[in-house]
Image: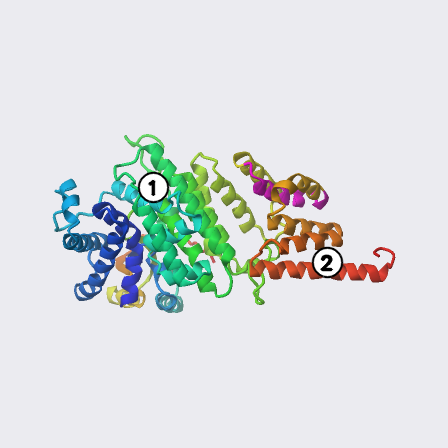
Amino acid sequence: MSDWLEAMFTQQRPRAIAALTRYLRDIDLAEEAFAEACVKALVAWRKNGTPRDPLAWLLTTARNAGLDHLRKQQRRQAILARHKQEFEPGEMLPPDPDELRDDLLRLLFVCCHPNLERQDQIALALKVVAGLTVPEIARGFLIKPKTMEQRITRAKRKIATTSVAFETPSPQERSKRLGEVSLMVYLMFNEGWSTSEGDTQIRLTLCEEAIRLARLLVALFPGMGEQVALLSLLLLQHARREARINEAGLLVPLDQQDRSRWDRGNIAEGIALLQKAQRINHQGAYRIQAAIAALHASAASAEATDWTSIEVHYAALYALQPTPVIRLNLIAAQARTQGPVVALEKMKALEGDLHGYRWFHTMRGGLMQQVGDHASAVEALETALSLGPTQLEKAAIKEKIAVSRKNLSALSESDPLSRP
Amino acid sequence: MIYAITIYGEAGVFESLPKAKQDEVLAGHYALQDALKERGEYVSIKLMPPTSAVMVDPAPGGDRAPLIVDGPFAETKESFLGFYAAEFADLDEALRFAAMISSPIARLEVRPVAWAGGAISTG
């Protein structure tokens, strides 16, 4: 029975913690109070059945538990003076949806505090909002639980000293928060995607939680095209999780993946969401990326992919965010539409900016292989190896190097004059 | 009489269940689908999460084209997740079949169908 109830608690948690943080003005206390309410629910709901409004039940119980703590800590006096009415124990009405929406956005925004490193922002959101345990989060980041515990404690201490106004935010402020929070969710997914090694269940936690948060943002802000697009993008990417690693545990590039292993349910939902986002007239970065992912997802094979449209989308994305990495992606599409020689030529302009970026060298190596320059391919791939690839990437790069070396030795055997 | 077995619940709760419990829920659905298939035609529909929905509201006054509006807005309440429909001898039989997919995360409703038409499948 408790598994069923735990799943319901997980579902209610973000909203509950957000509302409780506003009432109690303290994230730790909100977490404690919610945990206490869940323990009580385990007993009460089993005996009397699940209440009609589980969130209201949990909030009432948690708020009363929180007030109890405050009373004991005597911190109540100061806070009571500020909010006399609000702090009378008793039945709590379910919060107004608009208020709850701002509560949740505020809580997520607090986790995105600029003084925190990005990884700590993500860890904090996973702990406070998603309710993951410290060992679960540590596994997601491939670090020791003890280290993660310390980092979260430190992060909490940092945000405790900042004051984020509890008033209703202005539209500009709300939009700024939404942008920051969306970026954090996007990076949470990427973190999970890039560290994914070993056991499937463990490696996908971050991706799944990012999708859950992206879904929450859409539920809160259904009219925001970029948030709908972000959810679409993450689902389309996540659809490839089983195909991107082969039986040997090696990373499989997109164009070589077994597309029958892509999750059709995720793709269908991702495309439906992209269409929904496209109705909202705003050409944002997530929407363009989702459109690119949708083109990949709906192509029967790498060859059948609409590379021309992908090139157009990357050009649009580059116009919006003119970064060298996006330019590199644009060139990768152009390698398909205009050939590897053109692409290699265009890459020269990026050398200065991206010489420390391992994907630049991996891509260069791949293109050099295509034009048959295996000596340069090996050189580029070895540079990529020296730039800290993950275990999985390392294996894939080494395999490519082996292919080029084989070609080189075949070449020298057939034509002794071709190489010294 | 055709009866619909409609399913209500909170979207996302199923995904939060541990794998073993998810399998338990799915096993009920597979058993129901097999049992219905054996008896003849049936319909089953699973809706995507509410976040993928778009709302079409009537225009005020009702004499203009409907409005496509933002939404559905954040709801913590249960939503319509999907349904089955098939011919049953009587209400008791429909209720017996519905019981196969009963689980703590869903509320089921068995209701006679007044009219049905069309045929659709996603394969």
Residue A354 in view here? yes
Q: Residue at x 37, y 57 (%)?
A: A150
Q: How is the image coloured?
A: rainbow
Going 23% across and 42% down the picture, which residue do you hit? Answer: A96
Q: Is residue A46 above or below residue A98?
A: below
* Alpha carbon separation for disc pair 1 and 2: 54 Å
Q: Is residue A146 magenta?
A: no
Quarter of the figure that contains the C terminus of chain A: bottom right
Circle 1 is placed at which residue position?
A: B71
Q: Badge 2 sits on which subunit?
A: A
Viewer-side residue, A299 vs A236? A236
Label 2's element?
helix
Q: Nearer the viewer, residue A277 or A349?
A: A349
Residue at image coords 14%, 52%: A71
Q: Is residue A338 magenta?
A: yes
Q: Is residue A304 left or right of residue A161?
A: right
Figure disc tally:
2
Which of these two is toward me, A256 or A409? A409
The residue tagged 2 is: A404
The secondary structure type at the circle numbered 1 is: loop
Choose between A167 and B94: the one closer to the eye. A167
Residue density around tag 2, few if under 14, some if 14–19, many if 20 or more, within 10 Å: many
Residue extent of the magenta highlight: A322-341
Q: Position of residue A8 (x, y in %)?
A: 28, 59
